Image (cartoon, rainbow, N blue to C red):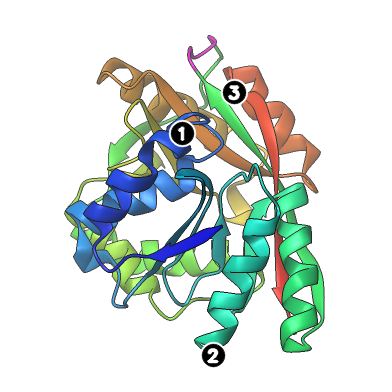
Amino acid sequence: MKLQRFDEPNQFYQKVKDYLLKYEAHHCLPLGIIDTLINHPERYNCQPYLASVEVEGNAVAVAMRTPPYNLLLSKTTDFGALEAIAQDLHLQKEKLPGVSSFTKESETFARIWQSLSGESYRIKTQMRIHQLEKVEPIALSNGYMRLATERDRNLLINWYEAFLMEAMGEIYDDSARFIDYKLKNNCLYLWEDGVPVSMVGYARGGTPNGKPIAPVYTPPEYRKKGYATSCVATLSQQLLQENSRYCFLFTDLSNPTSNHIYQTIGYQPVCDWNEYRFE
């Protein structure tokens, strides 16, 4: 078993793309991040951790991290690879806030990391990845979707931080950088009903065949009026018409309402995805 680290995102992508693309929807998040590292490196103000593990010349696992975010793990065909990744990170004295991956991969890595670091772990969020190929017809709410602009910047930062607190329980220190990147690349939209009432964005890079939809946020005072559903349906249709074969979406399993709503648009469950925090 051989672990290889990479300094250059392009070299990393050439090494791991065939493995990741075997399950494109499952790996929409790491594929999108790699694309951003290659084509929009200004998005991240850090040196990423990029690694693959091979057995007899064949990839069995991929790991990556863009601080301050969690370690991301691909599907693995050999769970011994998770031990190799954990050992490598521990030898580098990496301080990991957590790990995000599929149900078995994330739990297995969390146990290994606890044995190496002495840190306890707890599950923070349980999510599900969905894929859409066709938008089902729905009744849209009042208003219309428009591209967000610099004039919306302060509102978007406030909403994004509210989204992070609600979804993740914390605010990352690069919120303004994230919004500026999205605005620069025309990846954020607002639903307008007299005033802005909901926000939706997507990843400009995404995967070779699809685009992940995120973030999706509606302030509490505007909820239960279908704004988020209308946002996601309208943007998904736009992306499909712009030659994406798929759209991808993460939902929180603790919110059955949103899971049901997005399935009415046409999003179908692919797999579950968990986040563990280290303490």
**Helix, strand or loop for disc 3:** loop
What segment carries the magenta color? 133-137
Residue 95 seen from this side = no
Question: What mark, if any, has residue 93 been given in the picture?
Answer: 2
Q: Residue at x 32, y 30 (%)?
A: 208
Q: In this view, does 69 lie above or below 108?
A: below
**Three-letter code for the amino acid on which mark 1 is drawn:** Cys
Residue 35 rendering spot, x and y as whole percentages? 28, 48
From the image, which quarter does the C terminus lie in? bottom right
**Helix, strand or loop for disc 1:** helix
Disc 2 residue crowd, few under 14, some 14–19, many 20+, Cα 10 Å = few
**Three-letter code for the amino acid on which mark 3 is drawn:** Tyr
Residue 103 rendering spot, x and y as whole percentages? 76, 48
Asked whether, in this view, residue 65 is left or right of residue 72, the answer is left
Question: What mark, if any, has residue 231 been given in the picture?
Answer: 1
Q: Nearer the viewer, residue 59 or 269?
A: 59
Q: Which residue is drawn at 73% across and 28% down?
A: 260
Whichever of callouts 2 and 1 sits on the residue coming sooner in the sequence is: 2
From the image, which quarter does the N terminus lie in? bottom right
Asked whether, in this view, residue 124 is left or right of residue 166, the answer is right
Whichever of callouts 3 and 2 sits on the residue coming sooner in the sequence is: 2
Disc 2 from disc 1: Cα separation:
43 Å
Q: Which of 44 and 217 is in front in this view?
A: 44
Disc 3 from disc 1: Cα separation:
14 Å
- Write down the residue under mark 3: 267
Residue 84 rendering spot, x and y as whole percentages? 60, 67
